[in-house]
Amino acid sequence: MKTYAFRLQPHQDLMAEIVAFGKANNIRAGVLLTCVGSLEQVTLRGEHIHLSVSDGQGRTTGGHMLPGNKVYTTAEIVVGALGNVEFEREMDPTYGYAELAVHTKTPNQ
């Protein structure tokens, strides 16, 4: 696994920047190893990135992150790129949802 570390600045959109980083680095299968920082506000219930956040009193909530979560002071992020597989979404006939499909990459991909 190849790892990347980067920092986001105030007012950057957390989800948009993580997605852009993955695209810019051609990460086809990745894991968000850690993300520590602060947000101006939190919008949950989206898809693909699960997020847990705490307020100033230590109350914690979680859900699926939506675009629009702007960094307040910093977001320190570490991403792992899984070089031997690719993640795809494929229709699962069981319930009709597009579910995760993991494909092994061939050496010349």
Image (tube, rainbow, N blue to C red):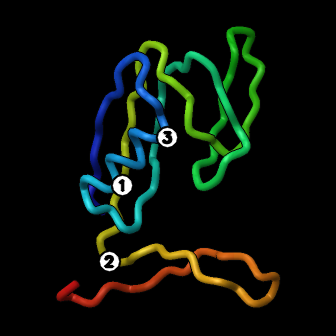
The residue positioned farthest toward the right in the image shown? 95
The C terminus lies in quadrant: bottom left
Front residue of 49/83: it is 49
- The residue drawn where x is 38% and y is 29% is 76
Q: Considering the numbered disc 1 on the image, is that residue within a helix, a strand or a loop?
A: strand
* 54 w.r.t. 6: above or below: above
Q: Position of residue 81 (x, y in %)?
A: 33, 60
* 85 w.r.t. 2: above or below: below
User: Foreground mark, 3 or 1?
Assistant: 3
Q: Which residue is mark 2?
A: 84
Q: Amino acid at mark 3?
A: Met
Q: Which residue is mark 1?
A: 80
Q: Amino acid at mark 2?
A: Asn
Could you tell me how far apart the alpha carbons at marks 2 and 3 are, in whole angstroms? 24 Å
Mark 3 vs 1, N-terminal side:
3
- Residue 88's mark? none
Q: Position of residue 41 (x, y in %)?
A: 62, 20
Q: Considering the numbered disc 3 on the image, is that residue within a helix, a strand or a loop?
A: helix
Could you tell me how far apart the alpha carbons at marks 2 and 1 are, in whole angstroms? 12 Å
Q: Which residue is mark 3?
A: 15
Mark 2 vs 3, N-terminal side:
3
- The residue drawn where x is 80% and y is 88% is 94
Q: Amino acid at mark 1?
A: Gly
- The residue drawn where x is 43% and y is 19% is 11
The residue positioned farthest toward the front in the image shown? 68
